[in-house]
Amino acid sequence: MPRFMIEVPHEESVSACLRAIEVFLQTGSHFLTNADWGCAENVHKCWFLLDADSREEALMVVPPAYRPVATIMEVTKFNMKQVEEMKKEHLG
């Protein structure tokens, strides 16, 4: 199953941070209540990982108010065998 990294930005104010955090925590979703936040470093975004069948399915986990600004990217882990196979295929 594909794995997605979801990034959700919010406005740069204490009230916006608190509102976003509260919305995420109130959902009760395991993914959202375990999101990592960058606010303490003045990076007003949160991130979480999710296994989903598609980007569209992953987006549905994001609270509706934040869906228009969410970035969803499929992420992959590699092992050395895969790297060697990719080198043979692409580098000869």
Image (cartoon, rainbow, N blue to C red):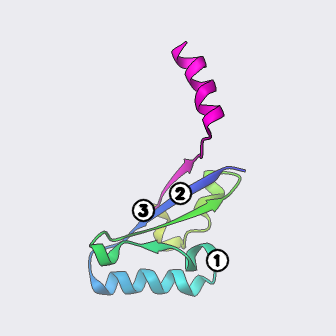
The residue positioned 36% from the left and 72% from the top of the image is 38
Spatial CA span between label 1 and label 3? 21 Å
SS of the residue at dot 3?
helix
Q: Earlier in the sequence, mark 3 or mark 2?
A: 2
9 with respect to 66 (left or right):
left
Looking at this view, is 52 or 41 the one in front?
41
The residue positioned 52% from the left and 80% from the top of the image is 24
The mark closer to the camera, 3 or 2, is 2
The mark closer to the camera, 1 or 3, is 1
- Return the residue at label 2: 5
Looking at this view, is 47 or 82 the one in front?
82
Q: Quadrant of residue 8?
A: bottom left
Amino acid type for the residue under numbered disc 3: Val
- Return the residue at label 3: 69
Q: Quadrant of residue 56?
A: bottom right
Q: Which mark is residue 30?
A: 1
